[in-house]
Amino acid sequence: MEGFRVELRDIEIFLTLAEELHFGRTAERLHVSVAAVSKAIKKQERAIGVELFARDSRNVRLTPVGEQLCGDLRELHQGLTQSLERARLAARGKTGTLRVSLFPVNHQGMRRYWEAFRSRHPQWELRLRVSAYADPFAQLRNGEVDVLVTWPPVDEPDLTVGPLLFAEPRVLAVAADNPLAKWSTASLEAVGDFRHVTADPVPGGWFDRYVPEITPGGRLIERTAVVNNIEDTLLHAAMGETVSLFPAHVALYYPRPGIVYLPVTDMGALPYGLVWLSEAENDMIRALARVARELGPLPGWDR
């Protein structure tokens, strides 16, 4: 190990791959090539002298040594990045950063909240990102983000549910050659005839609000393909492998060749609101919640 030097980027690649367990998603998330991810991991494994990830053609998982290293590095990396972030903020006259993770993708539709927060609190920086599906509340608990925008129910005793931002009718994404595509609307009952996606791990009651387990008539809605993001969900739908329920704004933000979005007539609107870790509540979180309450939900939220 003499002369071995670990770059911050290599640590980021290792920790992201440890979270995603997928080379492609890791590369996409870090805006690098898959080859760069593979090269960084091999470099670390050669230096340490043991495999950090066990991988085959279908799966990637941490080895015992990889799990130990992940635990050791995560806290170290978090402290280092926070120190660098504080220095960058100070250079721009900022005193803090509020990180918001979004399950809805209509970030433009919610601009009034972000603009009001920035206008009222120029001393703070606001950063937005789209959330991955799996283990939705872990990002709050591990300090990766400060606020999550998601749908209820959030039956988690350590989390605080804040004000609603909006609610939307539901649409069903189907392949253009799906038999449902010839209709102008769809019903939840019809979803029971087709497979749907799922996410893992997720709280059951929380995901059931998004994709119910059964149709109104009592038929099981088969949830098969495991996805971690909206692009994978749309890919399965476009290939005709599944159909996918979404809030209505997805049809506007994600038009796709080969996909038809059908309004779902027998589902209520899906609400979205702010959620945060109770013990981590601070002035920035309270300020965003106050902005949301004062501006109120987006027009048409109770349709």
Image: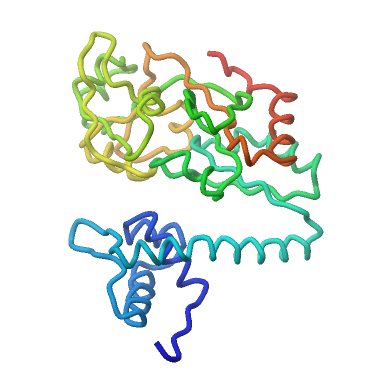
- Furthest residue toward top: 217
Front-lying residue, 214 or 242: 214
Residue 162: give x, y in percent of width and height. Answer: 62, 27
Which color scheme does this rendered protein use?
A: rainbow
> Is residue 301 shown left or right of residue 96?
left
| Residue 88 lies in quadrant | bottom right
Q: Which residue is located at x 64 percent, y 22 percent? A: 297
> Is residue 142 shown left or right of residue 217?
right
Tally the numbered discs. 0
Q: Which residue is located at x 67 percent, y 46 percent? A: 98
Residue 100: give x, y in percent of width and height. Answer: 59, 43
In the image, residue 232 above or below residue 68: above
In the image, residue 73 above or below residue 115: below
Classify the position of the N terminus by image quarter.
bottom left
In the image, residue 24 above or below residue 192: below
Residue 275: give x, y in percent of width and height. Answer: 57, 32
> Is residue 99 shown left or right of residue 247?
right
| Residue 242 lies in quadrant | top left
> Is residue 11 shown left or right of residue 43?
right
- Furthest residue toward bottom: 2
Residue 187: give x, y in percent of width and height. Answer: 31, 14
| Residue 62 lies in quadrant | bottom left
Q: Which residue is located at x 71 percent, y 61 percent? A: 86
